[in-house]
Amino acid sequence: MMQKDEDFTGWFERVILEAQIVDDRYPVKGFTVYMGWGYRIARAIARMLEEKLEEEGHQPVQFPVVIPEDAFMREAEHIEGFAASVFWITHAGDTKLDRRLLLRPTSETAIYPIFKLWIRSHADLPLRVHQTCNVYRYETKATRPLYRGREFLWNEAHTAHADYEDAERQVRKGVEIYRYVYDRLGLSYLILRRPDFDKFAGAVYSIAFDTWNPDGKVNQIGTVHELGENFAKAFELEYEDERGGRRLVSTTCYGMGIGRVIAAVIAHHGDDHGLILPPAIAPIQVIVIPIPFKGFEESVKGYAREVEAALKERGVRVAVDDDDRLRPGEKYYKWEMYGVPLRAEVGPSEVQERTVTLVRRDTFERSKVGLEKVVDAAEALLETIYQNLRERSWRRLESEMAHAESLEKLKALIEERKIVKINWCGDPHCAFRIKDEVAGEVRGTPWNGAEEAKGPCIICGGEAKHVAIVARTF
C-alpha cells in the first residue's frame, strides 16, 4: 500500500500513471501526455469553468497559438516578465521568417490587436472573452507533471471596460467565478494579493489562489489581474465615449491552470489507495461490480445492468465492470485507484433480495438498499461524499497554518513545512531578506483584508502594515 503522507512525491508519481491521469515520459522535457481518465477529468473541470464564465457574459474564442514579435514587444513590463521563457519560431523549413513568431506564454499580446478592431464605441463595452488552450513557457526550474511544465492546459479570460471602476467590478467577479469552481471541487484555498514585485508582468495588481500541498509547498491554482490602462496604452485600445470623446479602455485578465487544479484535487482528496474524485468531475460516479458465483453468472450480470439502467435514467454517470478477466478484488483495487466516488456491488444475495450494496470511496462505509431506492441513496451519498471531501480539505488547510512573531520562529515553522502568517511592513527589501534566509517566500497578503497586522514587522521591526503569508512554493 502506498503511503501518501510519508512519500508524497513517490505516491503522486505512481497515482498519476497508474490511474491514467498523465504520462510524463514524453521525449521532450516538460511536455506531458494527458491519458484517457485524466483528460476526461480535465475536460470536466474546463467545462465547469467555461459554463460559469459564459453564464457571466464571457464569449468563447480561440486565438492562434503564435504571436508576432512586434506585438509581443509593445508592453515593456510584460516583455521583461516573459522574455526569458519564450519559445521562438524563426524558420519555416529552411526558410528564415521575415519576422520572428513566438508560442503564446499568455495571450494579452495576441488578443489586444484584435480587441482594437472590435472595440469602437462605448456600445462595444464591456467585452468579455475566454478560451481554453495550451500555453508555452520555457521553465528553467525543475519541471513536474501537472504542477510545472513547459506546455500546460489552461483557461484564460480577457475583458475590456469603459473605466477602471468597471474593471474593478470585473476583478471581483473573476474571483467569484474561480471560487465557485474550487468550491465545487471541494478544494480549500487562500486568496492573496500578490506583492508588487511578484505581480503579473504589466498588471496594476494581481490576486492569486494558493492552496496547500502535502509536501508543505503551496500550489497556485488560479490568478486574477487588474491591468488598468497599461496594455490599452501600449496597444492604443481606445473607444468613443457617449460625448464623442476618445478614451482608453481598462482591461483585466484571469487564468486557471487545469493541470494544477487536477494536482490539487489529487493532493487534497487522495489517500493511500489512490484518487478520490469529487462527484462533480468524476467521469464515472458509480461503478457497478458484479460478484458472480458459479451458476449465477448471467443473473448477476443481468441484475447489474438493471442497476446501471436505473441510475443512468436519473443522469448519474454509471458504468458496469463486467470484465471477466479480473476478479472482484482486482476491480475494487482498480476503481479505488481511479477514485470513483461510489461502488455498487451486486452478487447472488443482492439478486435474490433485489438490493444493492453501496460502498463509499472516501470512508469505505457500506450500506445496503433496495433497488427501488438505489438512485435516491446514491445521489444522497454522492452529496455526502462531496461535503466530506470539502470539509476535510478546509480542516487540513487550517492545520497547515501557523503564526510566527520572529524570524527564528518563521525559519522553524517553514522547516516544519507550515504555511506561516507574519507581520510585514510592506517593504520589498524585508520580503527579499525572508527569501534569502528562509526556505520560503512572501506569497502575498489576504485579499479581503480580513486580518490586521498587530505588532512590528518581523524583519525590520518597523510598523507592520500587513499580515503576509510565507510558504515554500513550486
Image (cartoon, rainbow, N blue to C red):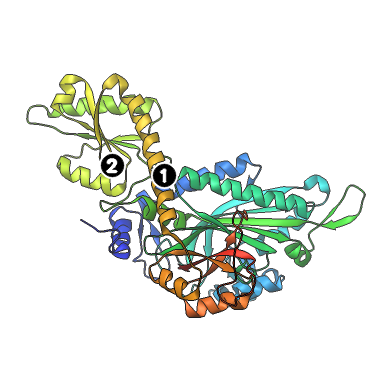
Pointer 1 residue: 391
Residue 97 seen in the figure: no
Q: Hey, which residue is sitting farthest front in the picture?
A: 455
Please state which of residues 349 and 454 is positioned toward the viewer in this rendering: 454
Q: Quick check: 119 left or right of 217?
A: right
Residue 165 showing in the rendered view: yes
In the image, what residue type sits under mark 1?
A: Glu
Q: Secondary structure at mark 2?
A: loop
Q: Nearer the viewer, residue 349 or 452?
A: 452
Residue flagged by tag 2: what amino acid is it?
A: Thr
Q: Which mark is residue 470?
A: none
Q: Is residue 3 left or right of residue 137?
A: left
Instruction: State the residue in front, 420 or 261.
Output: 420
Counting from the top left corner in percent of width and height, residue 400 is at 42, 59
Q: Secondary structure at mark 1?
A: helix
* Picture residue at 70% right of the left edge, 72% below the top: 70
Proximity of marks 1 and 2: CB atoms separated by less than 8 Å: no
User: Considering only vertical position in the picture, is 28 above or below 335?
Assistant: below
Q: Which mark is residue 363?
A: 2
Q: Residue at x 40, y 60 (%)?
A: 213
Above or below for 347 versus 108: above
Viewport quadrant of the C terminus: bottom left
Task: Name which of mark 1 and mark 2 comes first in the sequence.
Answer: 2
Residue 129: x, y in percent?
65, 50
